[in-house]
Amino acid sequence: MAKTLSDLRKEIDAVDTDLLRLLNQRAQLAHEVGELKRAEGSAVFRPARELQVINALQAANAGPLKSDNISNIWREIMSACRSLESDQRVAYLGPTGTFSEQAAIGFFGSSMARVPCPSIDEVFRATAAGSADFGVVPIENSSEGVISRSLDLLLHSPLHIVGETSLLVRHNLLRLEPAIEGIEVVLAHPQALAQCQQWLNAHLPNAERRAASSNAEGARLAASNPAWAAIASERAGSEFGLHTVSKAIQDDASNRTRFAIVCLPQTMAAPEATGKDCVSLAVSVTNRAGAVHDLLVPLKRHGVSMTRFESRPARSGQWEYYFYIDLEGHPTQPAVQMALDELRQLCAFYKVLGTYPLGS
């Protein structure tokens, strides 16, 4: 006999009760692990271990849940378990509704203690000062390139990178009114304005484009004037009572932003090797012929792959540059360590910005 709706609901209720019991059992075990880690003086939060758990569950999953569902569910479970030990304070570019907040939730789970900041500079300051345990900062966009301010701050900050995450960015036009007509000003972070310039040229060529400290701040400001609109997430629209006038207006359909997770070394040391790791460096060389070419020789000699190479002015007035380099691998691997040792000898300035597992 076919099951009725009532039968199915009773079965779901029974499964939910079992899930609750098992989740509490898991939380108790996680608490015991936390106690052992504290006794040993080791870090409670180990993102590489959490990623390993999620990857194993995704591999074992027989459906119908999708891999992304598994990741999201277990991130929240682990976040809730961690919160039983202590509030994990995470700083990010605020206010509520920014993509930085979304990236932070995706990495740490929603049980983190949120520390929204008015600027990227303040994220670094709060994390370095101990007001937050971790910071989440954007470092690269797939269409607009590196986030220069984040790179500049990493150069001389005591913080190091311990993780990364990337976010598929969907920009939406938000407004108090439900129509596009009558928009005089569009507010957003400069990166978002640049990422939507073709759409704005086609649909709002006469509207002023005004920079805001974040997209969510632009949404907050747009809520104060019916002639203003913002480019931000739908979550920001919900937060500030705005209509979504047009969805996904970014010029690049696959627009992604990469975020770095930063902290003080005493908060969390460089993660152990996972087999899929990255080393981020900042270096400079004396201004001589062939100096930049020489930087690449140790990498080729030892078979180490470079995945990013960016230059930024050193602001010394002497036409000098810092080079930001991402390498595949981990310093515990002999080839990577030998390449780094040789590279260091060639540099006038050399700093490891972080060693961390590659994000999704």
Image: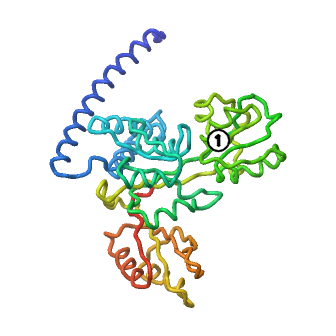
Q: Amino acid at mark 1?
A: Gly
Residue ID at (21%, 42%): 33
In the rendered image, residue 217, in percent from the top left (x then y), is placed at: 60, 41
Rendered location of residue 157, percent (x, y): 42, 63
Name which residue lies at 52% across and 51% down.
166
Furthest toward the left, the residue is 39
The correct choice, above or below, for 124 with respect to 349 in the image is above
Instruction: Name the residue that disc number 1 marks.
Output: 218
Mark 1 nearby-residue class (10 Å; few <14, some 14–19, many ≥20): many
| Image location (x, y in percent) of residue 329 | 40, 67
Q: Quadrant of residue 287?
A: bottom right
Q: Quadrant of residue 234?
A: top right
| 93 relative to 345, above or below | above
Q: Please give the name of the residue rendered at 48% of the width and 62% of the height, measured from the top-left corner.
A: 153
Is 241 situated left or right of 69 in this image?
Answer: right
292 is higher (above) or lower (below) than 95: below
Q: Residue furthest bottom?
A: 289
The number of discs equals: 1
**Residue 85 location, x and y as percent?**
26, 38
Residue 119 left/right relative to 271: right
User: Which quadrant of the view contains residue 36?
Assistant: top left
Q: On the picture, is 342 further left or further right than 308?
A: left
Report the front residue among 118 and 258: 118
Q: Mark 1: which secondary structure?
A: helix
User: Is residue 342 shown above or below 166?
Assistant: below
Quarter of the image for the N terminus: give it.
Answer: top left
Colour scheme shown: rainbow
